[in-house]
Amino acid sequence: MEAVKKKLQAELDSLEEELHFKLPKEIQKAREFGDLRENAEYKAAMERQSIVQARIMQVRNRLYEVDSIDLSKIPTGSVAYGSEVVLYDLEKEEKITYKLVTSEESDPDKGLISTVSPIGQALMGKEEGDEIRVKTPNGWRNFELSKLKTIHEFGE
């Protein structure tokens, strides 16, 4: 969880620097070009300022959400954030291992899937032995949850 907080804080720091130092300079420089109604540089800088302000609010909200996660309230017997699951793909007859993480930590190629991804959402609250049907970009997939290890078993 600390890695997520650090990543979000670094993004927030970068956005704040852009908003308070870089963009004011760009806006001032663009103003020097004259007529603001037909000044593309000014319009672009003002639009970027708006985008940065909106993203700052999103990152602050996400930091608040991450800070408010109470690990003691995560279930011990069903899939939730931090769980590692072994799924048996019923069509391909192969096992796949995933760890459920936040969207900031997500890296499907490394087996880290977000709790808000299609597979992550389908897994939430499931227990060992449950069958899961998931709609993916490549169509429907059917899995059996063959092994579950919750965040509590990792001692995080």
Image (tube, rainbow, N blue to C red):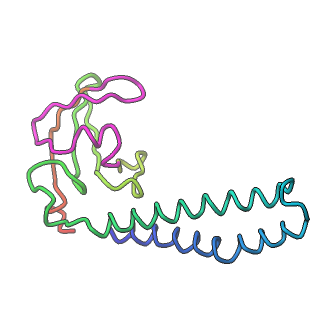
Report the side of 53 relative to 145 (left or right). right
Report the side of 58 relative to 83 (left or right). right
Report the side of 21 relative to 146 (left or right). right
- Residue found at the far right of this picture: 34
Which one is in front, 117 or 98? 117
Q: Percent position (x, y) of residue 24? A: 72, 73
Residue depicted at x 37% and y 30%: 136
Q: Where, by quadrant of the figure, is residue 70 drawn?
A: bottom left
Is 23 above or below relative to 101? below
Residue depicted at x 25% and y 36%: 95
Quarter of the figure that contains the N terminus: bottom left
Q: Is residue 115 inside the magenta stretch?
A: yes
Which one is in front, 53 or 7? 53
Residue depicted at x 20% and y 52%: 80
Is 119 above or below relative to 25? above
Report the side of 60 relative to 132 (left or right). right
Q: Is residue 128 inside the magenta stretch?
A: yes
Q: Percent position (x, y) of residue 36? A: 84, 60
Q: Percent position (x, y) of residue 87? A: 22, 38
Q: Where, by quadrant of the figure, is residue 39 drawn?
A: bottom right
Which one is in front, 60 or 123? 60
Q: What residue span does the magenta drawing correspond to?
A: 114-141
Is 130 above or below relative to 77? above
Residue depicted at x 46% and y 64%: 59
Q: Where, by quadrant of the figure, is residue 140 drawn?
A: top left
Q: Percent position (x, y) of residue 109? A: 43, 46
Quarter of the figure that contains the C terminus: bottom left
Task: Count numbered badges in the picture.
Answer: 0
